[in-house]
Image (cartoon, rainbow, N blue to C red):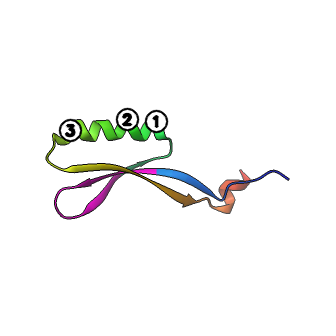
Amino acid sequence: MAYVRKTRDRWDIETNWGYGWEVECSEYTRKEAREQYRCYIENCGGRCGVRMTKRREKIAETEQEA
């Protein structure tokens, strides 16, 4: 029997405008997340903090069967 992952990786792009960290968008591949991260860095122009965090997300049983 093959191993089936119970979670998947999700990268969140977060900004901090002085009121705490907020998730702006999420991506499921690191490549797409880095592209979005660079866009946010360029567009914010140093006016806010931007970070990329990796989180684990539980996969629903119906998604695993498909």
Q: What kind of element bears circle 3?
A: helix
User: Which quadrant would residue 57 be assigned to in this image?
Assistant: bottom right
Q: Residue at x 86, y 53 (%)?
A: 1
Q: Residue at x 54, y 51 (%)?
A: 9
Q: In this view, which residue lies farthest toward the right?
A: 1
Query: What is the three-letter code of the residue carrying label 2?
Result: Glu
Relative to 13, is 32 on the left or the right? right
Query: What is the three-letter code of the residue carrying label 1?
Result: Lys
64 within the magenta span: no
- Rounded to the nearest whole Å, what is the CA distance between mark 3 and mark 1? 19 Å
Residue 18's place in the image compared with 50, above or below, is below
Which segment is the magenta one?
11-24
Query: What is the three-letter code of the residue carrying label 3?
Result: Asn
Disc ID at residue 43: 3
Q: What kind of element bears circle 1?
A: helix
Are the residues at dot 2 and dot 1 in contact (C-beta closer than 8 Å)?
A: yes
- Rounded to the nearest whole Å, what is the CA distance between mark 2 and mark 3? 12 Å
Relative to 58, is 18 on the left or the right? left
* Residue located beneath label 2 in the image: 35
Q: Position of residue 54 (x, y in %)?
A: 45, 52
Q: Position of residue 24 (x, y in %)?
A: 31, 52
Q: Residue at x 13, y 47 (%)?
A: 47
Number of other residues with Cα within 10 Å of mark 3, as a class: few under 14, some 14 to 19, many 20 or more: few
Relative to 16, is 28 on the left or the right? right
* Residue located beneath label 1 in the image: 31
